Amino acid sequence: MINPLFGKRNYYILYTGIWIIVAGVHLFVLTYEHVIDLEIAITESIVANFIIAFLGLSLWYPVFYLHYKHTNVFVSILQLMILSVVANIIWFAITFLILGTTFSHNEAYNHYLFQSIPWKLAMGLLYYFLIVLFYNFIIYYQNFKDKVESESELKALIKESELKSLKSQINPHFLFNSLNSISSLTIISPEKARDMIIKLSEFLRYSLSSNERNLTSLEKEVNNVNRYLDIEKVRFGNRLNIVKNIDEECYTKSLPWLILQPLIENSIKYGVYENIDNSTIELNARCTQDALKLEIINNYDEELIINKGEGIGLQNIRRRLKLIYNKENLIQIFNNQGIFKIVLTFPQNELNLK
């Protein structure tokens, strides 16, 4: 990332102006406090402050690198202090060498130069420490600004995603088919019809519910999927087969709310609707301390032409995951020889479910 002082002309002018003022104060102290010859004082002021300002610009890159190493606070502070000390030593060595060589014939100035070593080192260290703090402030401010913008974009995206989910989940066809199935069950098996109405109402309640953090547990998402599948199996019967392989410890892991059911619906749409043979949908879940990994697999008939409609909006889901977790490649899609597989990864150490 380029130094922000170069990104905007006003910042560069401000930085230059500050060092001109510092050089002026330096010149005043040399001529009136230490009674140094004006020519020598001007030379020292220009050399010392130009070098410290130049090195200050180059400090941005190690500061930026150290910030994104994600070390703990104590280590970060120690690294930045060491960086300031190293920069100060380099500055002092170069400045001392130039001034000492240039005015080697002036015994009075050389005497002053050696006497001023402690306060020069102290002032140089202070300058570099302030520069490092300033760069860290810029980084934290930019991160905060990016976070606010991302959260704003995420809120808008979630609203859009929820509307799209509701459009696919609570569409007239789904409700019509579900109510048709319930109507048939009232004649064949009233008890099953009552259970189906309860499951449909619970499914709709979950779909319409809100979650401020947009996170929930895998257990709740799977329960919602089970209700949805129970409703769909009334229509498809043995044509719809479900296989779930979920490790027990994965049920408490977190993932975005209302993200699993639309993917299952997508599998039914292309694996059952478009297939005259029996179809199997496989849901696998594996987890570690740091991540939850889900696989949704379904077979389909390769000879059938699948309508390339909007579907569930996999790109929208990919973007939603990127905004929530700030990571790429959390969703992968594989399509090979009549098998369609979606693999999702949900990090657990960045966002934890309360």
Image (cartoon, grey):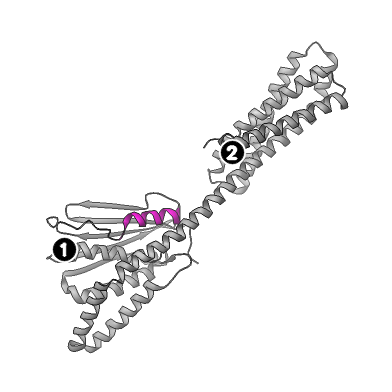
Q: Is residue 325 left or right of residue 79?
A: left
> Of the residues shown, which amino acid type is indicated by label 2?
Val
Q: Which residue corresponds to the image point at 24% horizontal and 85% vertical from the top-left? A: 193
Q: Which residues are magenta?
A: 312-325
Vertical relation: 109 (above or below) 312: above
- Front-most of 252 and 228? 228
Chain-order first, disc 2 or disc 1: 2
On screen, residue 129 versus residue 354, left or right, reads right
Residue pointed to by mark 1: 274
Q: Is residue 297 left or right of residue 24?
A: left
The image position of residue 354, as x and y in percent, is: 50, 67
Mark 1 falls on what kind of element? Answer: loop
Tell me, yes or no, whether the highlighted magenta stretch contains residue 206: no
Q: Position of residue 233 (x, y in %)?
A: 21, 74
Determine which of the numbered discs, if any, sits on residue 63 in the image: 2
Give how far across and how far down residue 72 sits, in percent. Answer: 58, 48
Other residues around mark 1 within 10 Å, as few (<14) / some (14–19) / many (≥20): some
Other-residue count near label 2 (Cα within 10 Å), few / some / many at <14 / 14–19 / ≥20: many
Give the amino acid at mark 1.
Glu
Please report the residue visible at 75 percent of the width from the left and 32 percent of the height from the top. 21
Magenta span: predominant SS is helix
Looking at the image, residue 84 lies above or below residue 338: above
Q: Position of residue 13 (x, y in %)?
A: 65, 33
Q: CA distance from mark 2 to mark 1?
A: 57 Å
Horizontal side, residue 198 vs residue 306: left or right: right
Task: Answer yes or no: is residue 72 visible.
Answer: yes
